[in-house]
Amino acid sequence: MKKIGILFGKENTFPQAFIDRVNEKKVKNVMAEAVSIDMVEQAKPTDYAVIIDRISQDVPFYRAYLKNAAISGTAVINNPFWWSADEKFFNNALAEKVGVPVPKTFILPSSHRPPDTDENSFRNMKFPFAWEHMFDTIGFPAYMKPHDGGGWKSVYRVENSQDLWKKHGETENLVMMLQEEINFTEYFRCYVLDTDNVHIMQYEPRNPHHLRYVIDGPPIKQELLDLIKKYCIRLNKALGYDFNTIEFAVRDGIPYAIDFCNPAPDADVNSVGQDNFDWIVENAANMAIAKAKKFKKDKMNLTWGTFVKDQITGKKTTYK
């Protein structure tokens, strides 16, 4: 029997719906359940062919468990090694390299010194920093957000340099990035499964959380939807994420990737709506079953993006 497990925390609607949908399909020698952990011993395999990870970003013990499971053969969704290494500022740099438009972005030194450092720890940093060049390039208003993500925590809209200094001081040891504001006419959030299965949702990030997914929105040109889908696939193949969301803000007909490192994205029926919920449950179940069928014992069954694979093979993935 090939077991599919889901590891989760506070969320309620998606995990059980996912388990039920996998088991309703009655695939021979495949079943799903909530992951159960009573002991973690180094290099020992788990009982699971596949684990969908929804919580390790908040629980370091789970991340360690998943890495140990992965090295022993479990297909962990998403790859815990890449997830640990990834962050949003790098994502922006990678997007530029693969030809996906992103807002102009700079990374900022932390407002406060990190613990156990003093002025000698920063002898490689020029003083003053090139603030004026950054401000001239980005323009105001702009957005300041943590360089490594954080679920819309510590995100600031800054009106001018003085506003930035004030708010930057509140961030203490966080490393922030300063990003150009995109005044958008349309906005989309896209589920991407198995790197190339795309579900595009109209989205309004300025609404309260439970009203952000747009129902019965205005018609969208097919060429724009096709371009967004192409960019979704391009980014996820480079990153190697099996389960992700990507957000696009459209300005002058150009979709800019705003947020595309969400390896445990919102999938709650109360926020995404019934139609989107049904899509993610059905397609996540199909993906997990397919990976369980492909599972090879004692082999690495993770997904790696082209960014990593190109470094190993010496080949360079090209994008038209």
Image (tube, rainbow, N blue to C red):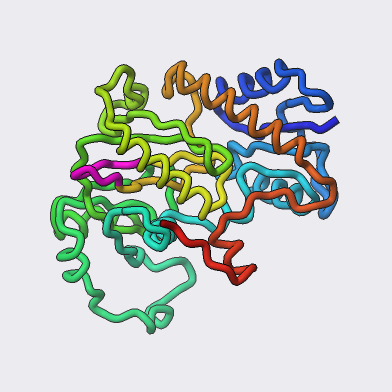
Residue 256 position, x and y percent, is 30, 48
Front residue of 27/119: it is 27
Residue 75 position, x and y percent, is 71, 44
| Quarter the C terminus occupies | bottom left
Check residue 286 for magenta coloring. no
- Please provide the residue range marked out in magenta: 247-255
Residue 214 seen from this side = yes
The residue depicted at 70 percent of the width and 51 percent of the height is: 67
As drawn, is 123 to the left or to the right of 217?
right
Counting the numbered discs, the total is 0
The residue depicted at 15 percent of the width and 65 percent of the height is: 136
Quadrant in the picture for residue 173: bottom left
| Quarter the N terminus occupies | top right
The residue depicted at 27 percent of the width and 59 percent of the height is: 104
Quadrant in the picture for residue 214: top left
Residue 174 seen from this side = no
Location of residue 120 with respect to 25 vertically, above or below: below
Magenta stretch, overall SS: strand
